[in-house]
Amino acid sequence: MSRNAIIFSIVAAVVFVGLTVGIIGFIGMIFVNTPASVKPASDESRIAEANADANLGDAGILELRCGVPDKVVDTSNDNPRPPIPSRLDSYKKPGLKIGFVPKGGHIGDPPPYRWSLLGVVDSKTNKRIGMDEAVKRLPCWKGTK
């Protein structure tokens, strides 16, 4: 057998073993993380966790209560970064755009930020709405699903 054939055989065996281990690991990960084997946290425990973590801020609490927004526009990593970064979370179904600015800190501070609520806008009219209307459209925000 030639030297190239031996090298090819060794490389093929290593690739085969690597792929087999990877596939078995992936399948194991799927079975371990199935919804039947993962106990979901209650709303109360998720809210308590959010309130306990001082770094979450208003945006983090909203995301824990209502899920990940459909779209997030965050200027904190823009280059150059604006003096006061902003974050805009969009939830399509309730038709809300929710604006945040960093809480505390100083102008020009780098991320991560603790986001503080700036206001809520109706997605269709682009007009500001009050918290009462926002909570009617997105009741999970105040923990009243």
Image (tube, rainbow, N blue to C red):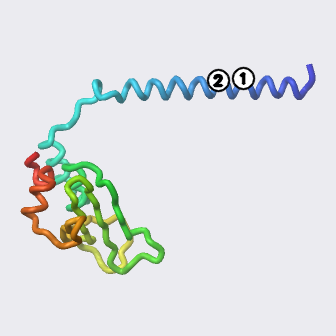
Q: Residue at x 13, y 61 (%)?
A: 134
Q: Is residue 65 left or right of residue 77?
A: left
Which residue is the site of mark 1? 13
- The image quadrant of residue 44 is top left
Which residue is the site of mark 2? 17
Circles 1 and 2, Cβ within 8 Å, touching? The answer is yes
Indicate whether 113 appears above or below 12. Answer: below
| Spot occupied by residue 64 in the image (x, y as percentages of width and height) | 22, 49
Q: Residue at x 14, y 42 (%)?
A: 43
Q: Is residue 32 left or right of residue 66?
A: right
Q: Is residue 124 left or right of residue 79?
A: left
In front of the other: 62 or 134: 134
In front of the other: 70 or 61: 70
Q: Residue at x 18, y 70 (%)?
A: 119
Query: Residue 87 has which mark?
Result: none
Q: Residue furthest top?
A: 1
* Disc 1 residue type (three-letter): Ala
In front of the other: 67 or 29: 67
